[in-house]
Amino acid sequence: MQLDLARIRNLRPQQQIHYLPSVGSTMTEAARLLAEGAPHGTLVIAEQQTAGIGRLGRSWISEPQAGLYLSVLLRLPLSPANLPIASLVLGLATAEAIHKATHVACDLRWPNDVLIGERKVAGILTHLVENFIIAGIGINVNQTSFPAGLRTPATSLRMESNGRVQAREELLLALLESLDGFCSTLQTKGSSGILRAFMSSSSYAMNRRVIVEEGGLKGLTAGLDENGFLLLRSDTGRMERIASGGIRPDRPV
Ligand code: BTN
């Protein structure tokens, strides 16, 4: 079923919403709108992406009408030094929205994988363009299966709630509200409010054995620094600051 956009537009009259039945990637469409002067909060949402973009040059499978595929333009009070905070804001907002709309609890894996157990239910991409962040969020909502051999196994909210079809509109509304909420936490409490929220929402933030995807460094997670970078007590005993890439569990073979 198509998204009931009229309902979203009614409840979010202040937001510029661009709805596309099909697009290559909402990221490129959002970048085009930004170049034309679109304001903070502009939303691009598609029923289907034919060339969905994932992190680290991967692709994002975007089955028609099954998930939420969107990009939002955000102007946040962040400097280039503490830009990772933006990723944390987006992960927190996505996990909170999922919980509010579906009662499914999620875990966060730095910088912004949204997981249920060890399976990925949502992915987030941030592109910095001048002083805007183009935030791409993909949530697996009503998929019933995924291709085998994904780097991180995937799941959907439907698969995690005994096959119940989830209303994408409720989830989208919750997501837009949670984004407003965490953006205003950042405005009023600064980065420390976001860091605290992430530390209490992520089982990966402390004392987890992980491997860094870029470079293969291994060690135990040791929290975040003030800019949102991950701290890792590496196996050599040194405290490392991880600035990019992602992490995954490091299991003995
Ligand atoms: C990841 O690899 O974890 C990030 C995935 C981000 C996917 C979303 S779907 C909406 C937006 N448009 C894209 O092409 N990618 C992001």
Image (cartoon, rainbow, N blue to C red):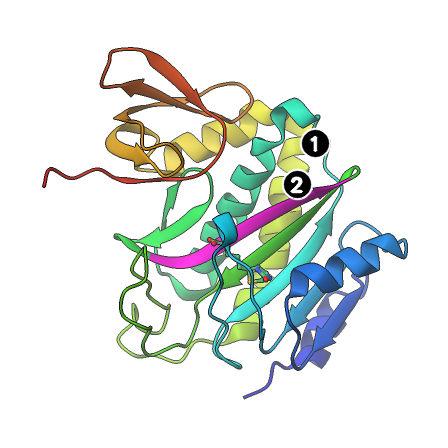
Residue 43 in sight: no
What residue sits 41% from the left and 77% below the top? 142
Check disc 1 and give the amino acid type. Answer: Gln
Look at the numbered disc 1 and say if its residue's Cβ is closer than 8 Å to ligand 1.
no
- At 47% from the left and 57% from the top, the residue drawn is 58
The region drawn magenta spans 120-129
Q: Height in image: 178 above or below 49?
A: above
> Splitting the image into 4 quarters, where does residue 50 fall?
bottom right
Residue 192 in percent (x, y) is at 55, 23
Q: Is residue 40 left or right of residue 163?
A: right
**Residue 53: x percent and y percent?**
55, 60
- Sort mark 1 into few (<14), some (14-19) or many (20+) by Cα contacts within 10 Å: some
| Amino acid of disc 2 | Cys
Asked if residue 110 shows in the view, the reply is yes
Q: Where is mark 1, residue-wise? A: 187
> Which quarter holds ligand 1?
bottom right
Establish whether ligand 1 lies closer than 8 Å to the Cβ of label 2: no
**Is there a contact, CB below 8 Å, between mark 2 and mark 1?**
yes
Task: From the image, give the main secondary structure of the stretch colored magenta.
Answer: strand
For label 1, the SS is helix
Label drawn at residue 168: none
> Is residue 142 highlighted in magenta?
no
**Does 126 appear in magenta?**
yes
The residue located at (79%, 37%) in the rendering is 131
Residue at the limit of the structure toward the right, as seen here: 37
Disc on res. 183: 2
